[in-house]
Image (tube, rainbow, N blue to C red):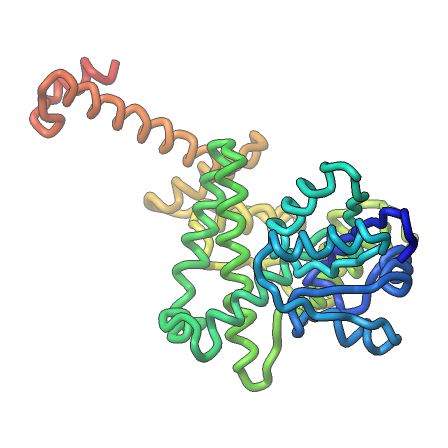
Amino acid sequence: MTPGRVGRVVVVATSPRLPVGLLTAAAWDVLRASPVLVGAADHRQLPALRSVGVAVDVVTEADPAAVSALLHGRALAGADVVWLAAPGADDALVRALGRLCMVPPTVVLEILHGSYDPPGARLLDVVSVMDRLRSPGGCPWDAQQTHESLKPYLLEETYEAYDALETGDLSALREELGDVLLQVAFHARLAEEADPPWSIDEVATDLVDKLVRRHPHVFAGAPAGDLGATWDAIKAAEKGRTSVTDGVPLSQPALSLAAKLQKRASRLGAPLSSYGGIGGQLWELVARCREAGLDPEVELRTVARTYRDRLAQIERDVRTDGGDPAGLSEEQWEQRWS
């Protein structure tokens, strides 16, 4: 402490998602240069600090106002004081410090971010929360689920995300993509209990490897050329496919399935053939859509959505008029519809 000098309080904030000790050079300089105080003996950064000889005092006082007064008082006495913040838990302390530091003689309050979350860091929270839910003491419902029991939810959440895309509701899309991500994290967590086990890390590793392999024009300096043909050739080599129909999921909606098969056949110049019955007529209708550059699934969904909206509006109008939609005659329906 220097007589007559007013010190400063430096609050060092760190990310709970990065490895312990992975701090900025500025943070390490501050932590080594001044007395360090912390509010919890189990702060995750303490082992790293102590391993390089940084002395840390644990403050047992839990009241933010009392702790802020302690730090402020030391700074007024001429000391530079470092507070190693608890990740996301010291907001009240910082606010109290801010109020004190505005009163003359003023004390400099500095917030130093010792580490930052890189893009995608919150995905680690998804993994952590999913593990907590699935582990002993977590959620009984989550603990009972299997890959088989979760199958309907994967489809349901995917359709809800697709619905948000159709309506152009980006706010809803954000939420629904989160639900899709939950299914990915859930299945990956279940797989940790399989034999042999794998985790979300293997999922991410496989995805990155696939993206790199299938984009040689980006990662390997290859010429772009015909990207579609290159993509297909790489996939065929990877999976040992012998037919253009290999890899087409038969579980997708029938219109999409028909369009995908016709598209694959067109690469070979194969005829589409003709079939009898309603199915054959639908098959030909899909071909006509493709010739016009249209997606039959999207086109039919657009009509179905338009029909749904009009029907719901008429039902509301009839009820507003005091009637019952189920009691309308065919003629009344025609009048309402037009």
Q: Can residue 240 be seen in this view?
A: no
Residue 237 image position (x, y, % from top left): 74, 66
Query: Is residue 321 depicted above or below 179 in this figure?
Result: above
For this view, does 157 lie left or right of residue 110? left
Q: Is residue 269 visible?
A: yes
Of residues 210 and 45, the one nearer the viewer is 45
In which quarter of the view is residue 99 placed? top right
Q: Which residue is drawn at 87% across and 61% down?
A: 34
For this view, does 288 lie left or right of residue 315? right
Q: Residue at x 51, y 54 (%)?
A: 180
Q: Quadrant of the C terminus?
A: top left
Of residues 267 and 135, the one nearer the viewer is 135
Residue 83 image position (x, y, % from top left): 75, 58
Residue 111 image position (x, y, % from top left): 77, 48
Q: In which quarter of the image is the N terminus?
A: bottom right
Q: Residue at x 49, y 45 (%)?
A: 161
- Residue lying furthest front in this view? 3
Query: Is residue 197 depicted above or below 171 in this figure?
Result: below
In which quarter of the view is residue 307 placed? top left
